Image: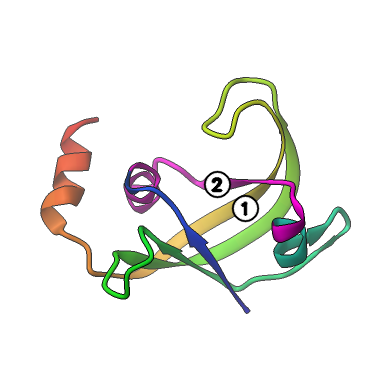
Amino acid sequence: MTLHLTVTKEWFYKILNREKLEDFREIKPHWIQRLGTEGNFKKYDFIIIKNGYRTDSPFMLCECGDIRITRKDEQTDLGKGTFFAIKIHTVVAFKNIDILQVKEQNNER
């Protein structure tokens, strides 16, 4: 089974460059339906991560790790609180990626 996630450009390139190894989603009905509940999480083999909704948007295929619930007491892009944490493993393939943007992201480190 494959999970589909859409992320902003910033997070997309952090995932591609392996600076971000987990994605966090709010615990809401939409994500409970897709990810499951504590002790009964759905098992995904892959994640397709897209930057945008267009048919030619950059995307990557990654191996999916564990899904769990985690508490974040420090400020995150979603705020503080309890979230789904989706472990992102190896980037298997990608398409529609501007290599110059990848190098630009790498040079900012």
Q: CA distance from mark 2 to mark 1?
A: 5 Å
* Label 2 packing within 10 angstroms: few (<14), some (14-19), many (20+): some
Q: Earlier in the sequence, mark 2 or mark 1?
A: 2
Position of residue 58 measured from the top left corner of the image (x, y, whole percent): 29, 64
Position of residue 32 measured from the top left corner of the image (x, y, whole percent): 77, 58
Q: Residue 41 occupies which quadrant of the picture?
A: bottom right
Residue designated by label 2: 22
Q: Outermost residue, top direction?
A: 74
Q: Is residue 66 left or right of residue 59?
A: right
- Residue drawn where x is 22% and y is 41% of the image: 105
Quadrant position of the C terminus in the picture? top left
Position of residue 33 measured from the top left corner of the image (x, y, whole percent): 76, 65
Is there CB contact under 8 Å for labels 2 and 1? yes
Q: Residue 71 occupies which quadrant of the picture?
A: top right
* SS at mark 2 in the image: strand
Bounds of the magenta span?
10-30
- Residue drawn where x is 26% and y is 72% of the image: 56
The amino acid on which the numbered mark 1 sits, given as a three-letter code, is Ile
* SS at mark 1 in the image: strand
